[in-house]
Image: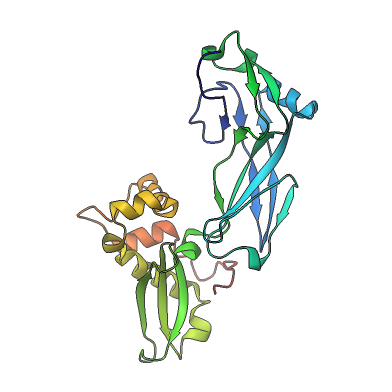
Amino acid sequence: MPDLALPMLLEDGSRLDWPDATYAPEVRLGNRVATVIHRLSNAPTLERLIEEGAAEWATELRCPKTLLSRIDTATELRWEDSEVDGLVYLIPGLVATKDTQLEAQDLNELWSGLTLDIPAGWWLARGREYRTSTLRQALLSFAEDNSLPNGGMRVSPDLSSGEVRFVAHLASDIYPTGRHDRSMQIAGLIGACAHFPEVFTPEIEDEHTLVREIRGRLDDVKIPAWDADDYDPAQAATAIEAFVPQEEPFPEQEDE
């Protein structure tokens, strides 16, 4: 067999090992719980491996800050507060449960005529990373600041944890209710976006998936990023998380 990487079916379609197949998981996120529904189409060889018990649907749970990395084959995943700190990611997929062989009949013609030796633990299908918080929640937290005058706010970067975070400091009179107020949250996000040009260096962007995700979000809606001359923090913030009209209620998780 030629010295080739083993095939993998990716959710984003960036590999063409299975030209006609798709993997489209659905991930529903809750408070320390997630439900994962795996959907596979036009991949009979993978379906046969599942039927034979040689492959199984699974989801990897990762928390970079605590170095947690756990693979769970349950449809519903749960984790404890004590296991995680900061960002938590879920990566669904199909994993080989034992050493097995894969016939190349569904694969790209590059694999024509081959029978592939698949080792146990190889991800045959792999989804994208699903973050358990919104981009705003991942970026921004709130803290009470007694030094601020009534009604005051200031936003500062916080890289002390190794993650890219910003803290919106609120005056004591507005902190109890302000940190739960959506308009205040967006205001804090605008303040965080104002720091992007100084904080999001090329080195930081290389190291942090979150920063690259933010750039991708801005690129998708054709909004200048922080290294452009016409960058606008308010426009960037409302591309990350938009204002909603007051008459439309917005279900919101409590921010720490």
The x and y percentages for residue 90 are 60, 50
Residue at the farthest top position: 113
Residue 12 to residue 100: above or below? below
The x and y percentages for residue 37 are 70, 43
Q: Which quadrant of the view contains residue 80?
A: bottom right
Whether residue 124 is visible: yes
* Residue in the image at 55% along x and 66% along y: 248
Residue at the farthest right position: 52
Seen from the viewer's position, the closer of residues 24 and 207 is 207
Residue 256 to residue 231: above or below? below
Whether residue 224 is visible: no
Q: Is residue 7 left or right of residue 94?
A: left
Q: Which quadrant of the view contains residue 93?
A: top right
Colouring convention used in this rendered image of the protein: rainbow
Seen from the viewer's position, the closer of residues 189 and 146 is 146
Tag count: 0
The x and y percentages for residue 53 are 79, 30
Residue 64 to residue 19: above or below? below
Quarter that holds the N terminus: top right
The x and y percentages for residue 111 are 55, 14
Residue 78 to residue 178: above or below? above
* Residue in the image at 71% along x and 23% along y: 100
Q: Is residue 186 left or right of residue 108?
A: left
Quarter that holds the C terminus: bottom right
Q: Is residue 165 left or right of residue 252?
A: left
* Residue in the image at 65% along x and 28% along y: 119
Seen from the viewer's position, the closer of residues 78 and 97 is 97
